[in-house]
Amino acid sequence: MNAFSSKFLSDNRKSAIQKRPRGPKWMEVFAIVVALTMCGARGEAQQPKKVARIGFLGNTQSTFTIDMKTFRERLHGLGYIEGQNITIEYRSWEGKAERLPELAAEVVRLNCDVIVSAGTEAAEAAKSATKTVPVVMVFGADAVRLGIVADLARPGGNVTGLTSISSELIGKRLELLKEVIPKLSRVGFLWSPSNPDADYNVKEAETVGRSLRLGVQSLEVKGPDDIEGVFEVATKRRAGALLMSGGGFFAFHQKRLIELAAKSRLPAMYNNIRYVEAGGLMTYAEDRAYQYRRAAEYVDKILKGAKPADLPVERSKKFEFVVNLKTAKQIGLTIPPNVLVRADRVIK
């Protein structure tokens, strides 16, 4: 072999050796690949979680500052923080039932993960607006009787939550009025046709009234312009007390109703504690704060994957008898000690 051939073979061997992958280089490449894979995995794990959107369909703005505080506090206790992992969209119908269909449709268009309804009117509007978005009722008239859910144990559909027994409490409220005013013979019953449960409430009041030997005067309030007039009618018919039906219309006009009751010096029994806290005389009703806390727990279950159809609807279990002594003094009424001692709360 000549010198030229030897040099050619030698150069080829060097070139082949140089093209072979060296051990350390492969290790470096492997380490880089592993590192990139781990970074990708960590990046995926650190991706922000979905922010759940809750739509709240209620009656008045004041509800947002009182009852919703309880609702938000319970959600916070369950690990939800507004602006971080949940947002709440508020819509209120301000005592105008005709606004409800559009407000409910608007909440649905927001692509909420769950809708919370406060009151019978809102629950019906939400149910009509969607058959797919879960709806949690905070309170409202008998949901089965009104056809909002099929059954308490297995509601079916997309609506669950809590249902009130306010109509069944009418008898207890009339009994308390009679105990407070032993000589009571006539009671004016204020009701609004915007309340889906109005007809049932009127019949219930009249039936219980007969059993207690009380004349129940039906006082229909069709709109804001009728409010003052029904108080004049109650006075002319010599009603000795007033019993207030439920519904968002009355809740929106709460201040005016309380003022007119005081002006007429008529003892009034209301359907929830907010009236009494605002100056009304007394109430025997569901514990509203408890209802909002439980509604938050229903929302939590749904956001974690539970189906409304499988979550039993809960009837109210906690009730409060609340008396406002300041108001009693203002209208010249003395609450008997045997009644006062049974109050869960006395406002002085």
Image: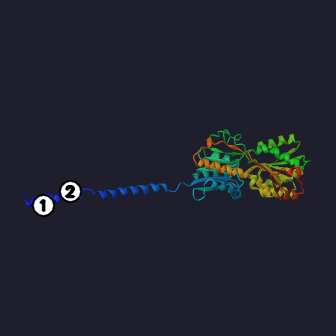
Residue 60 relative to residue 3: left or right: right
Which residue, given by chain and number where applicable, does mark 2 sit on?
A: 16
Residue 292 relative to residue 174: left or right: left
x, y percent for residue 298: 64, 48
Q: Secondary structure at mark 1?
A: helix
* Image position of 144 with respect to 49: above or below: above
Which quadrant is the N terminus positioned in? bottom left
- For the question of whether residue 195 can be seen, the reply is yes
Which residue, given by chain and number where applicable, does mark 1 sit on?
A: 7
Residue positioned most to the front = 23
- Front in this rendered view, residue 290 or 264: 290
**Residue kind at label 1, given as amino acid type:** Lys
- Front in this rendered view, residue 330 or 196: 330
Question: Spatial distance from mark 2 to mark 1, Cα to Cα?
Answer: 14 Å
* Image position of 75 with respect to 145: above or below: below
x, y percent for residue 117: 67, 50
> Which dot marks residue 62?
none
x, y percent for residue 265: 88, 56
Which quadrant is the C terminus positioned in? bottom right
Residue positioned most to the left = 2
| Crowding at mark 1 (Cα within 10 Å: few <14, some 14-19, many 20+) | few
Residue positioned most to the right = 183
Q: Secondary structure at mark 2?
A: helix
Residue 306 relative to residue 35: left or right: right
- For the question of whether residue 270 can be seen, the reply is no
| Crowding at mark 2 (Cα within 10 Å: few <14, some 14-19, many 20+) | few
